[in-house]
Amino acid sequence: MTLKLYNTLTKQKEEFVPIHGNRVNMFVCGPTVYDYSHLGHARTYIVFDVIARYLRYRGYSVFYLMNITDVDDKMIKRANETGLSVKGLADRFTDAFHEDMKRLNVMSVNLYAKATEHVDEIISQIKTLIEKGFAYDVDGDVYFEVRKFKDFGKLSKQALDELKAGARIEVDEKKRRPEDFALWKKQKPDEPFWASPWGNGRPGWHVEDTAITTTYFGNKYDLHGGGIDLLFPHHESEIAIAESATGEKPFVKYWVHSGFLTLNKEKMSKSLGNFFTIREVLEKYESEVIRFFMLNAHYRSPIDFSDKGLDEAKQGLERIKNTVDNIKAAAKNAGEGSEGNIPDIIAEARQKFLDAMDDDFNTREAISAVFELTKSVNQAIPDGLSSSALNMIISTYKELGGIIGLFQDEKKEGGITGDLISLIVEIRENARKNKDWETSDKIRNKLKVLGIVVEDAEDGPQVKIR
Ligand SMILES: [Zn+2]
C-alpha cells in the first residue's frame, strides 16, 4: 500500500515520501480577509482538510499551516470603502472565515499564521534576497528580479516571454522589467505600515507565504496546496523567492492543486452576480451536503455547482445516513444473532476506500465504496444480525467517515442543545400518553421544521437530526 499523489511540479503521480520520515509539513494558501469566503474557497479548504485527515489516518504526524493575508491592496481598498480600519476589517472577516470553516467541519489546520504577525520574518527574507542580488530597492519599493532566477516557470511551465505578455503582470514604472514583482510596497498616505530598512511600508503577497513557511518548516517542506488559480503567478513566485533566498531546492517537494469550481457552468464572478458565499449556501443546504457534494468528485477535476447537483448530493447522503440510523436503531435491540458475511463486506469496503484514497486522494471512488457498503448492509439487515456485527458496521462508517469528515454525529447531540431536544421529546411523549394528539403533533411538526425528526418506535421515540 503506497500512497501516490499528483505533483504539479513534475506533472505526474508520485509515491508520497515525506522529507523527515513520518513527519509531514503541509501548507495551504489561506484567505485574504477582506470579505466572506466563497464556494471556490470552500472547495479548496474541504479538499485539503481531507488530505490532512487522510495523512493522519495513515499514521503521519501532520503539521498543517495556513496563512491569513490580513494586509494587501484589496484589504486597503475595502477598508477605505467601508470606513473600517484595515485591522478592523481583517478581524471581522478572519472571525467569519473561522466560523465558516467550523461549519464546514474543516478542523484540521494546526496553525493559522497572520501576515501582519510575521513582518519581521518577511523583512529578513527580503534583506537576504537583496544581499544575494535577487532583489532591488527603488525609492522604498523592493522588487524581485525575475530574470535572475533561472528556474522561473518550472511549476506553471510558462516561459518568461509568455509571462511578459501576460495580462496579470502589475504595471509599475519603477520596476526594471515588467515581470518583476513587489516584495515590499512603500507606504502611501493613510495606509498601514511597518518600519523597514527601505522605509515605512508593507509586505507584498508572495513573500508573505515563503517567510511564514520558512519560519515554521525551514528551507524545504513536504506539501504545498492551493486552488489551481494560484498556480501562476503566486506559487511560481513563491518558488523563485524561497529557492533564491535559501539556495536550496526543491523548496516544496509536492505541489498539490485543487480544480476550479464553476457555478451553473460559468466562472464565479461577483460582477456578473454569479457568485455565492459559503454562508449563503449554508442557509439553503446543510454543511454535510456541501462537503459530500465537493468530495463526490476528484479534487483535481473541475466541478459545477448547481441546485440540481446539491439536491442529488443531499439524496445520496441521506441514503447512507438513513442506513446508519437504521443500524443504530437495530443495534439497540439486537442480541446474539449471526455476523453473516458482515466482516467480509466491511473488509472489502475498507480496502476499496483506502485504495481509492491512496490513488491521489480519489474521494469520489472512496465514496462509491461507502455506497457499495450501504447497499450490501441494507441487504444483510433483514437477516437478523448480531449486535456485534451491527456495531462493527457502525464503527466502519465512523472510521471511514472520519477521513472525509462525514457521517459523524457527535456534534448533533450532547451539550445543552441535546438536553433541550430530549426535554422537548419527553414533553411530547407525555402528551401522547395522555392522548393529547394535538400537542404531540404540533411539537413533532415544529421540530421537523427545525430538521429534528421524531419517529415513534415500539421502544420509545427515535430522534434523527437532519
Ligand atoms: Zn499563498
Image: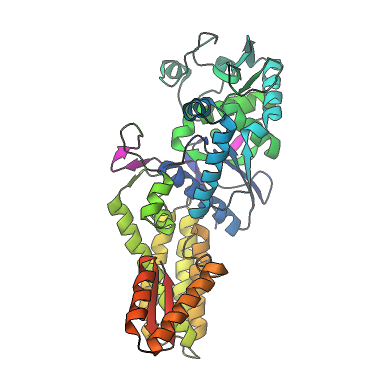
Of residues 132 and 17, the one nearer the viewer is 132
Magenta span: chief secondary structure: strand
Is residue 68 rendered to the left or right of residue 422? right
In the rendered image, residue 135 lying in the magenta stretch gets the answer: no
What span is in magenta?
A: 251-269
Q: Do we see residue 340 in this rendering?
A: no
Quadrant assignment, res 284: bottom left
- What residue is rendered at 71% in x and 25% in y? 124
Judge whether 459 appears above or below 20 on screen. Answer: below
Q: Position of residue 123 (x, y in %)?
A: 69, 24
Q: How is the image coloured?
A: rainbow
Of residues 98 and 80, the one nearer the viewer is 80
- What residue is rendered at 32% in x and 42% in y? 263
Q: Quadrant of the C terminus?
A: bottom left
Quadrant assignment, res 434: bottom left
- What residue is rendered at 68% in x and 15% in y? 199
Is residue 388 rendered to the left or right of residue 454? right
